[in-house]
Amino acid sequence: MISTVSRPEIEGEREEELGGQMSFLEHLKELRRRIIYSIAFVFVSFIFCWFVSDHIYNFLAIPIRQALAEAQERQLPLGGLTGGEKILPLDSLKEGDVGRYVFAETTRLGTSVIPAGTAVQARVARDAKGQIGLFTDEPIIAGATVIPRGVRLPIELDARSLPGIDDKLIVTTAMEPFSLYVKVSLYAAICLSVPFILWQIWAFVSPGLYPHDRAYALPFILLSTISFVIGAAFAYYVIFPPAATYLLGLGQDFRLLLRATDYFDFIILVMLGMGVIFQMPAITYVLARIGLVSAGLLVRIWRPALIVILIAAAVLSPTNDVPNMMLFAAPMILLYIVSIFVAWLFGKKRTTE
């Protein structure tokens, strides 16, 4: 009896055989092709992100602006004294409250400029339109400038919306805004390209795997993408706000002038770092399915793993104090425990064909 084999089956077997017999130069050629694809995709994403770079900038600046608003919140003392009486923030004042207001920064009032540190007796009252505001209760004398009594100060009785209170990110060169937007667009493009880059990595590695191992590509890419987004969001919403508040609290005796470039380097590093760290369960899933990692192995090496986690937390943490380092180390330890359960649920012994 003569058995027949279809042409597609022969070609598939031939591709698998060639995939395992590629020369070193052929591997380099394949690697170059995957890198070119990834760079091209990142470039296209960069062009898209450039047109919305101002929105990305404003989104990433929200945590530091809120932290600065809390650190530099303007307060109006009641009673006209600056001694031991109770001090109320502007957003808690009501009509009729009187006290001394100190200009925290140079402020333009009509055609006059009031220097920082100028103090004036002020009263909370309503104007002719019935809108509540803060009015001078005495003339302001600052050098050759005299502002009469009853002038409304350019202050909103909401500490969050005060002009200049949260707009403290500064640039020091003319080219810095351009380079900052380029940097923000590039990092955003890399984040958008994560699924495609992961697919290219898998496409390069998969020829060296068994056919049944290649079926884990789609779950790995989906799980890795979701994990990256969760990690970046965790850094943005959970880790960074208390860290920024703590750091700015240390500088309460100084005038806070933060360089925009330094801030964005820091927050992007933290978000990308946590996005990579949150890949731990996804990588464990693939390695466990292939048979290279087991739950027992992860349990046995927990001491070296803990040391690596603490080192990574020390690198990512902006300060060397224990509370901030533990803020970064805690999610890593939790992810390691999750990885143990992932390996236990999906792991299997390594078999050869």
Image (cartoon, rainbow, N blue to C red):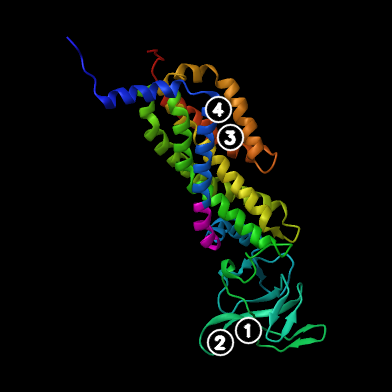
Span highlighted in magenta in the image: 44-55
- Residue type, label 4: Leu
The furthest residue to the top? 1
Q: Decide: marks 2, 1 in contact (CB < 8 A)?
A: yes
- Sequence-wise, which precedes: disc 4 or disc 2? 4
Query: How far apart are the alpha carbons under marks 1 and 4?
Result: 76 Å
Query: How far apart are the alpha carbons under marks 2 and 3?
Result: 54 Å
- Sequence-wise, which precedes: disc 2 or disc 3? 2
The furthest residue to the front? 2
**For residue 344, above or below residue 160:** above
Residue 152 shows which numbered tag? Answer: 1
- Residue type, label 2: Asp
Image coordinates of residue 184 in percent, x first then y, are 58, 54
Residue 25 shows which numbered tag? Answer: 4
Query: How far apart are the alpha carbons under marks 2 and 1?
Result: 8 Å
Residue position marked by numbered label 3 in the rendering:
329
Q: How many marks?
A: 4
Mark 1 vs mark 4, foreground winner is 4
Main SS class of the magenta portion in the image: helix
Mark 3 vs mark 4, foreground winner is 4
